[in-house]
């Protein structure tokens, strides 16, 4: 049976710091006016009040990560000849990710289906995933921009996590979700949770019940697909977009990347960095041809990927977890909920016209 | 997570350039072997599959393996100089080291094409993917019906594989037509646009497949010409080129709707392309 424990608020940081002696502990930390996931240190300002500014996806898919290192050396007999040695650089540091919200953790499952897919397993991602214990924190105060409940998640959803923390006033109920989360809890000296588990469950249900009503966006795939050739629609919904990419970089489900080489003298690295499909360069080909040269086409692909293409390939699961960062941090207040709702309304109206 | 550690999808095999062939002023062919003899011996691929070539310090780019699986002395890649990576590749010489991640992607339906007549229509560097299938079929000649090749380039000097053309022109078991947009006084073959020459050749669509590759505008009008000759979309095969990074369907760069050109392509029939969102 999976375990449940309890920890009082004042013991939380000392407990996390004790964990950091044997592993990297990442937690939402207030710094420079933002809350970002960083290594926890004794003087860190832990911020568990709301959603962190950026998602914790960097724990599994760093913004910039070295995949390969290489070294050129001159031939002894013929200096004009160089040889090159190449080696992979894997990162396997044990990590405890604390305080990720359910939407963000659900985002990891979006990655899992792509990066850990059968014979094509991404060793860099899989190594990090294997070495990272994910402790999520149920939401108790969703923001106006939150819509996890409309895309298959919820404020107390534990999908993708190993441990689920729920705040119940003076401390946290900690429930194991997976066996390794269970093992982890059993090895710690935390209180017995007792009937607080019931309180935690009721807390999560109450939060979910209090979230505003909204049409589910799960039915969007087909409707978005129907609008593929409706260029005026995509021009309309993307008109004010700046193509800045903030939405992609903050999104817990955006996983597209670039690979580039860097050289320093005879030594070099091949790095993988986050990329952004709203960028003109994303699909620009060597010939100069760009399949998505217009912003409207790029927006169509971005929405299409999240609400149509990804679900079609992955059993209907959307590549959107409703965290709302793309809404709250967009410099021109784009709202993905509005775009998808408009798509749904438009597609249904067209269907009715055809039926009439 | 499974217990078996995954192999590294991004770690290229080290390879040595055995020979560099100057095809045209801006196309070179590289013949390479993998440095690990076991990896080279066990290497297998199918006609149409591609590889990522690495010049370490510059990056990677995708090229079709244009040698044939029937001739495994080396792997051959033809590279047109168009950007930074291809520029650097063009500076390499025999003996230099590069990285190879291959084979990637799908292949021509060469099994399904058995017993059929085959029409190859290549333009410029688009001859490269055709060459792998053509050589494969010539090496398994009895498996296929009539084979015809129409290869066109801007000028005689822009024809790649010029050292192989006399053999193809001289073979009695295939028909070869060459054409250029701009002829020279000593040019003995056709002068004219590929689709027009194709209509003159008028290959029969009965029990046939057409395979075409070249610049997008050439493909567009070649497909129209093939339609006018009675070829159906299911009988027309082409290869797509997209900007690619990972080559295995993860990085998200080469998608067309739900399809990733790097793993679901680069080979598609025109019927399959018609099913895809119009975003080529």
Image (cartoon, coloured by chain):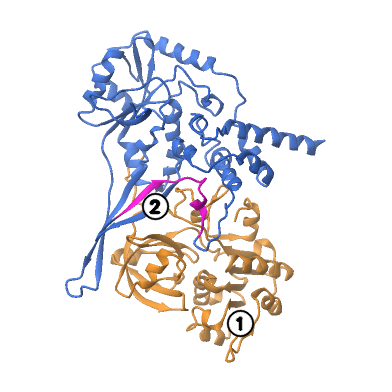
Determine the CA span between mark 1 and mark 2.
40 Å
Judging by colour alone, the chain drawn in orange in this rendered image is B
SS class, disc 1: loop
The spot of residue A65 in percent (x, y) is 33, 46
Query: Viewer-nearest of labels 1 and 2?
Result: 1
Q: In this view, does A147 lie above or below B271?
A: above
Which tint was used for chain A?
A: blue
Q: Do labels 1 and 2 share a chain?
A: no
Q: Quadrant of residue A185?
A: top left
The spot of residue A115 in percent (x, y) is 41, 43
**Mark 1 lies on residue:** B182
Q: In this view, does B243 lie to the left or right of A38?
A: right
Circle 1 Cα neighbour tier, 10 Å, few/some/many (<14 / 14–19 / ≥20): some
Q: In this view, does B64 lie to the left or right of A3?
A: right
Q: In this view, does A141 lie above or below B88?
A: above
The spot of residue B126 in percent (x, y) is 54, 70
Q: In which quarter of the image is residue A161?
A: top left
Q: State the extent of the magenta-drawn residues as a range.
A: A269-285
Question: Can you say which quadrant of the picture contains the N terminus of chain A?
Answer: top left
Q: In this view, does A8 lie above or below A101?
A: above
Q: Kindly tell me whether residue A8 is visible in this rendering.
A: no
Q: Residue under mark 1: which chain is it in? A: B
Circle 2 Cα neighbour tier, 10 Å, few/some/many (<14 / 14–19 / ≥20): many
Q: Identify the residue at horizontal 60%, vertical 71% (top origin).
A: B115
SS class, disc 2: strand
Q: Identify the residue at horizontal 42%, vertical 35% (top origin).
A: A108
Circle number at residue A259: 2
The spot of residue B271 in percent (x, y) is 65, 58
Question: Can you say which quadrant of the picture contains the C terminus of chain A?
Answer: top right
């Amino acid at each position: 049976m999976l375990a449940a424990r309890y920890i009082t608020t004042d013991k939380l940081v000392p407990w996390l710091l004790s964990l950091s002696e044997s592993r990297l502990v990442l937690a939402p930390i207030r710094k420079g006016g933002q809350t970002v996931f960083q290594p926890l240190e004794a003087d860190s300002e832990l911020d568990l009040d709301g959603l962190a500014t950026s998602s914790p996806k960097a724990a599994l898919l760093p913004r910039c990560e070295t995949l390969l290192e290489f070294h050129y050396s001159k031939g002894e007999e013929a200096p004009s000849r160089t040889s090159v040695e190449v080696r992979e650089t894997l990162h396997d540091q044990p990590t405890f990710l604390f305080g990720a919200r359910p939407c963000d953790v659900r985002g990891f499952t979006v990655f899992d289906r792509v990066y850990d897919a059968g014979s094509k397993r991404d060793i860099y991602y899989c190594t990090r995933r294997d070495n990272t214990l994910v402790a999520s924190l149920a939401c108790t105060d969703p923001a106006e921009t939150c819509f996890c409940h409309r895309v298959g998640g919820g404020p107390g959803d534990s999908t993708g996590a190993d441990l689920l923390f729920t705040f119940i006033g003076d401390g946290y109920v900690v429930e194991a979700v997976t066996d390794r989360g269970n093992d982890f809890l059993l090895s710690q000296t935390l209180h017995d949770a007792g009937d607080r588990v019931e309180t935690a469950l009721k807390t999560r249900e109450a939060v979910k019940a209090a979230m505003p009503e909204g049409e589910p966006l799960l039915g969007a795939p087909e409707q978005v697909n129907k609008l593929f050739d409706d260029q005026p629609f995509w021009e309309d919904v993307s008109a004010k977009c700046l193509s800045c990419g903030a939405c992609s970089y903050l999104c817990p489900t955006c996983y597209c990347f670039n690979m580039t080489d860097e050289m320093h003298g005879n030594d070099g690295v091949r790095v993988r960095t986050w990329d952004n499909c709203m960028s003109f360069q994303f699909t620009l080909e060597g010939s100069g041809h760009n399949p998505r040269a217009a912003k409207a086409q790029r927006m169509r692909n971005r929405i299409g990927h999240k609400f149509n293409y990804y679900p079609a390939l992955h059993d209907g699961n959307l590549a959107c977890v409703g965290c709302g960062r793309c809404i709250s941090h967009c410099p021109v207040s784009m709202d993905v909920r509005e775009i998808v709702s408009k798509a749904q309304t438009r597609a249904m109206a067209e269907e009715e016209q055809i039926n009439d | 997570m499974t217990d078996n550690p995954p192999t590294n999808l991004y770690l290229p095999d080290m390879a040595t350039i055995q020979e560099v062939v100057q095809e045209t002023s801006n196309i070179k062919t590289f013949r390479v072997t993998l440095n690990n003899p076991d990896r080279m011996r066990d290497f297998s691929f199918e006609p149409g599959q591609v590889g990522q070539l690495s010049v370490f310090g510059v990056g990677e780019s995708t090229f079709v393996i244009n040698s044939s699986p029937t001739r495994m002395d080396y792997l051959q890649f033809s590279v047109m100089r168009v950007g930074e990576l291809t520029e650097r590749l063009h500076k390499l010489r025999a003996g230099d080291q590069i990285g190879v991640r291959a084979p990637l992607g799908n292949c021509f339906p060469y099994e399904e094409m058995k017993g059929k007549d085959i029409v190859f229509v290549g333009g410029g560097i688009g001859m490269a993917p055709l060459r792998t299938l053509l050589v494969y079929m010539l090496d398994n000649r009895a498996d296929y019906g009539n084979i015809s090749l129409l290869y066109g380039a801007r000028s005689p000097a822009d024809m790649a594989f010029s050292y192989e053309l006399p053999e193809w022109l001289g073979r009695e078991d295939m028909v070869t037509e060459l054409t250029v947009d701009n002829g020279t006084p000593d040019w003995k073959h056709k002068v004219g646009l590929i689709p027009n020459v194709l209509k003159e050749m008028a290959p029969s669509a009965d029990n046939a497949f057409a395979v075409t590759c070249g610049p997008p505008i050439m493909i567009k009008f070649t497909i129209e010409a093939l339609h006018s000759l009675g070829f159906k979309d299911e009988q027309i095969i082409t290869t797509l080129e997209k900007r690619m990074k990972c080559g295995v369907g993860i990085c998200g760069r080469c998608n067309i709707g739900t399809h990733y050109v790097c793993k679901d392509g680069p080979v598609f029939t025109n019927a399959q392309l018609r099913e895809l969102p119009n975003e080529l």
